[in-house]
Amino acid sequence: MSATVECKKLISLVSRNTKCYFKDKFTFFISLITPLILLVLFVTFLRNVYLDSFNSAIPEGFALDERIINGVVGAWLMSSVLSVSAVTVGFCSNTIMVMDKMEGSLNDFKVSSVKGTTVSISYFISNFFVTFIVLTVIMLLGHIYLACVGWYISVGDAFMIIVDIFCCTLFGTLLAGVVESFIKNQGGLSAVSTLVSSMYGFICGAYMPFSQFSEGLRNVLCCLPGTYGVGIMRNHYMNGYLEAFADEGIPAEVIEGIKSGFDANITVFGTEIPLGAMYGILLGTCAVLLAAYVAIVIIKNKKK
């Protein structure tokens, strides 16, 4: 009976947190506009740079349909935007937890019959739900763009992209939950949000392929778990286009070179990481972050 009551309280808190987030039009706008700005910047300013990069990777004498080239560039950009946004939006949408501390709402929960652990779990579930919604909207907008310029994504890969978004969202929301558990004021929140927004895309290889970095820096950055969120997205977004390359007669070794050059293949200290291992590293990190989050919640509630 008590478990049922606590579950109802959890559902109510998740609903409350989610409504608070969507009622704050400014916060919602910022979390949605950031990935949209990235998408627009990629399409308007960086698209030609990546077009030239893909075209230069094609051997002389091969003429590919423009829809394949335009599509693979768009797919690569989409994998970048979604994998980065899973973390940046996760940090942004988790501000409800910090704001409750600042405004004293958390103190109201303490004197109520709601358990502290229930409150903490509600923040995580709400953050995951909100972030997943925002990323799904961005994915649909991106897929409309890909349908216009060149769609070569199979049904299977489209399904796996949704799975990838789920995994990346889980990673982003858990990371945000752990980090922002220690933030108690607006200054700290702004500092962390700015740092994550400005740096994360570069250190996970979303904005620039790791092939452009020095070997030492590449090996270090490839040890970061967020890199593998980008890697799984790259694989499922680019699969159909690379198969179209093969159908057009592009040699297999050239296609493998493209996969390595554009981070569909990730190599660490000379060892190529298979796709299954990428999932293992990302989800293993999620398990560690979940354990850390649970430990933080338990310790904080024992101190009360």
Image (tube, rainbow, N blue to C red):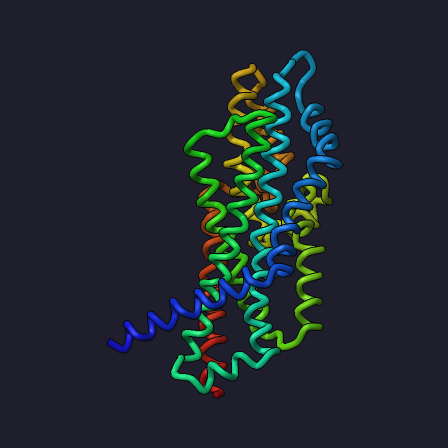
User: Would residue 291 appear left or right of 218 to someone viewing this image?
Assistant: left
User: Would residue 133 appear left or right of 88 to someone viewing this image?
Assistant: left
Of residues 107 and 175, the one drawn nearer to the viewer in this rendering: 107
Q: Position of residue 295 (x, y in %)?
A: 46, 74
Q: Is residue 136 above or below residue 101?
A: above
Q: Name which residue lies at 57% across and 29% down.
A: 256
Instruction: Pick the quarter of the image with the N terminus.
Output: bottom left
Residue 117 figure quarter: bottom left
Q: How many marks?
A: 0
Q: Name which residue lies at 71% across and 29% down.
A: 53
Of residues 135 and 173, the one drawn nearer to the viewer in this rendering: 135
Q: Position of residue 121 (x, y in %)?
A: 44, 69
Q: Name which residue lies at 43% across and 38% down.
A: 159
Q: Is residue 61 above or below residue 79?
A: above
Q: Position of residue 189 (x, y in %)?
A: 66, 69
User: Would residue 254 appear left or right of 279 to someone viewing this image?
Assistant: right
Q: Name which residue lies at 33% across and 74% down.
A: 6
* Residue with the most extreme left position: 1
Q: Position of residue 110 (x, y in %)?
A: 47, 84
Of residues 90 and 36, the one drawn nearer to the viewer in this rendering: 36
Q: Is residue 304 above or below residue 238?
A: below
Residue 147 figure quarter: top right
* Residue with the most extreme top position: 61
